[in-house]
Image (cartoon, rainbow, N blue to C red):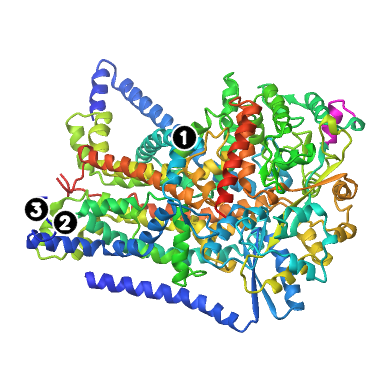
Amino acid sequence: MRKKSLSSLVLIFLLTSSFIFAEGKGEEAAKAGEPVTIELYWPWASELNHEAIKSIVERFENLNPDIKVQITLAGGYSLYEKLLTAYAGGEPPDLSAMIFTSQFAIRGVLRPLDDLFDASKSIKREDFFEASLRQATYGGKLYGVPCLEHGPQLALIGNKRLIQEAGLNLSDFPETWEDVWEWNNKLTVLDKAGNLDIVGYDPRSDVGGRNYMWEASYGIKCYDPEKEKYCWDDPAWVEILQYINRYYKKWGPERFDAFRKSNRDFFSPQSSIVTGKKALTVNGYFSAGKLALLVPDEEFHYSWIPVPESRRGVKVANLGCFSICIPQGTEHPKESFSFIEFLLSNEVLDITFDKCGFITATKPYIKHINKTRYPGFDFFINSLLKAAEIYPNSAGTDPLGKYSWDAWIRATEQVVFGKKTPEEATAELQKASMQELNKLLSSL
Amino acid sequence: MQRLLTSTREGAQRTKLGWLKKFKWRRLIKRVILYAFILSLSLLFALPLLWAISTSLKSEPQIMVAPPEWIPNPVLWRNYPEALTYVPFFRYIINTLIVAIPSVIGTLISCTVVAYGFSRIRWKFRNVFFFICICTMMLPLQVRMIPLFITFKHLGWLNTYLPLIVPSFFGSAYYIFLLRQFFMTIPVELSDAARIDGCLEAGILFRIILPLCKPVLAVVALFRLMLSWNNYMGPLIYLRDDKLWTVALGLTRYQTAYAGRSTWAYLMVGSVIATVPILVIFFLAQRTFIEGITLQGIKS
Amino acid sequence: MKHKGFPLRWTGSERRQFLKGILFISPWLMGFLAFTIYPAISSLYYSFTRYDVLRPPRFIGLANYADILFRDKLFRVVLYNTFYFVFLGVPAGIITAFLLANLLNKNIKFRPFFRTIFFIPAIIPVVASAMVWMWIYSPQYGLINAALARLGIQAIPWLSSPSLAKLSLIIIHCWAMGNTLIIFLAALQNIPSILYDAAKIDGANDWRQFWNITIPICTPAFLFTLLTGLIYSFQYFVFAWILTEGGPNDSTEFYAVYLYRNAFVYFKMGYASTLAWILFLIIVVITLTLFRTSGRWVHYGGEN
């Protein structure tokens, strides 16, 4: 009896494994005849985005029969798990899109791209906004090419209906944070149970809650790449926390959090700006398309993000998100780079815009793009031409990567829940960030 | 019985008819309360499925309405065919079954044998080994993931289903522990009697223990099936080719990034389609494992 | 355990039994050697290193342990949150599941249907459950607060309040106990109806039957659900990550959430491994204690 069960165990084992091996092998054999295969980690698993990249790859392979592109789908945080395990296994993908370039670059695992970039015939440095390239630069070297989804992220968006209902005038649209505060007080509506029903402005939601928005608005930094140090000790951060806390003191942190959870953040359904529950928000170019598609009957006003009183009238924009990087030591950097070049041609950028709604704001492309595709979209494109200051997305320049986002969120929460004063919170933030940074630098 | 007697005593003074009325009345109230309780509870438990079904039939703008609405208006049945052709979802279901079926078989075979060794045979250091076995559940996967990935890479198993299937043939602490607990409840006398009759240990396992443990075996099979069904991290890391993806990964293909068209309804179609097969299996199989065999007459 | 010497002073039958035992557990033993030992040892080694996965680990001795135990302020918060969740959530979850199992074991109409319904939370993709709970807990539109408003009670910020968020997650945890529920249902089937009949004749009421028959016979299942519940609750992750992301104000930053952030967001795999091994030690101590005491309260029909 025991022998029987053992042998059946072995049999089943062999059967299943042979079945699976057979499938795997068939594919290997098909690959053997191909010249060069490069692998791309595509950061979105969604089918819409997949369709786009599939058709792009098809075109590319037709033009370059000697190169084959293998698309590996991964999305969100999963991208990092997949990427890190691939690095640990010694086989990182030839091309991967990432936001936090410096977090990788500082560890020396990315290939500097300056040589390939300068030798390129189809893309030139002048084609990019300086801020875009700065996001992908670490220690003076370029480690990524802005690509896939890399656009202007800042505008103050107002719901025209709610503004009218509150008796406010679009001609007085807020320009400074004090203006926003005043508007907020007139726009915010509580329901009978005391919940926030309509919020004027929530300084911790959407892109408006991110540290890089405050950097652009105040003209400050949280990390200075030249000096290799954090700047959370800049008094402006205390001022910002005090400003945020004003809102939370007035309505209570729990009410705000509950409002956010009832209405969700912009990136999920029932976002308050979509449902008409929030009058003002700061968000990126992608909101124009999303709002136009989801709430076609509602009208929105798009304008420059608020600045502090001392900078009244300064028009600021921000640019950034993904860059494509090539790991150190891959076999086919040239072929990989040629695919990046292809991704940046206007024709291909049009496909990504059409199918995914993503843009890559290179100078030639914003001349070419259909600015009127969605109401408000033109504001974002024009902002890149009219802004006095364009800031990079500091996520790319910060060697601690998402650590700083989390630390910033933690600091603001400690302040709004009354656990720390703004001064204590920023001091703590500075100390902890510098400690982390020094540990990282000492390990190099 | 007891209650019946007391109520008879209470009702002794009244007419026979009055007693009957009172008795039924009490019983009825009890039943009504019981059913009302169960019904309201089951509503709470069915909510996510109802939500998923409702959302899966809505138009995208209706999904965005606050406060959320429960009744889809209009009812978009076409979301179903659209969503299921939009990504190759049936392919993912078949892939999942290709992973799940051998895994279930492997788990059943290996875990019963091992659990038998941990419960029905007395040997020295049994508890030490058993505790080591339990310990394997205690180290979080997140820190084991990378070395495990490297192991499978050296075996040349990446981009195949082997890393998802083979380990199940070597037992898993959770199921071993569960089976052990149930094996332990079977009287020793049964095995002893069989041993005296000259039965081998394997014979005892297959002829005596397993037939008595069908309910828990079915539970193990169900849990293992669910594990393959819901496993996200494993397929994500080991599979490169999206044609090999399983249901849990496949669902992510309905999650759109922030720009362009939103496909929340499709995601809910996927969730409903992913849930229903397991629910049906559960509904059909529960006769085996819940209404299953009891040890009547053996114990006492 | 008369003869302690291994294996020289064993009798022939002891040696035979030992080999027999090893033979039966050999599948697990092989798997342990092939797929468990190497990852475990590696992560133990990483815990003494600075390791970001991208570059080879560098040995730094006990620095990670010292950092976590003496300098990491967040670690204390995380530890508190985790113990709070485990010590409240595990018993609450088991009791809920056990009571529900008894309810579903009653002689009711459409029993298979109800049992299936109660199993839904355990199998539906987490996105759907997360959306539903987000709605249930919403102070503005939610189910609970709508009911409270009828009674004239002010809206409660379930997930939004640092003092309530953990409790809210524990309620979800109790609701999603489908697996435990099934195990108890299976265990309840093991009770011979003769026992109840005998008890009825002895004049025991429902409550006494429940207390003297049902619970003792289910103790092996209790031990199982308690231990595995502890082990998995110490590694609780999903809803804390999706619904609250560790907030508000770090009140739901649980052990596994913090560990995950360190490993895959901050690229501190060495630090995360240290966290993992500290957690491992905590769980081992608690489980070992439970195992030691289990002889007193777990009744196996088989042995003894």
Chain bearing tag 1 is: C
Q: How crowded is mark 1: few (under 14 residues within 10 Å), some or many (20 or more)?
A: some
Magenta stretch containing residue B273, yes or no?
Answer: no
Residue under the point 46% across and 32% down:
B36
Q: Nearer the viewer, mark 3 or mark 2?
A: 3
Chain bearing tag 3 is: C
Q: Which quadrant of the figure has residue A97?
A: bottom right
Residue under the point 38% across and 25% down:
B25
Q: Left of A387 or right of it: where is B148? A: left
Q: Nearer the viewer, residue A125 or B96?
A: A125
The tag on residue C76 is 1
Q: Can residue B11 be seen in this view?
A: yes
Q: Nearer the viewer, residue A383 or A224?
A: A224
- Distance of mark 1 from mark 2, alpha carbons? 42 Å
Rendering coords of residue A103 (x, y %): 63, 53
- Distance of mark 3 from mark 1, alpha carbons? 45 Å
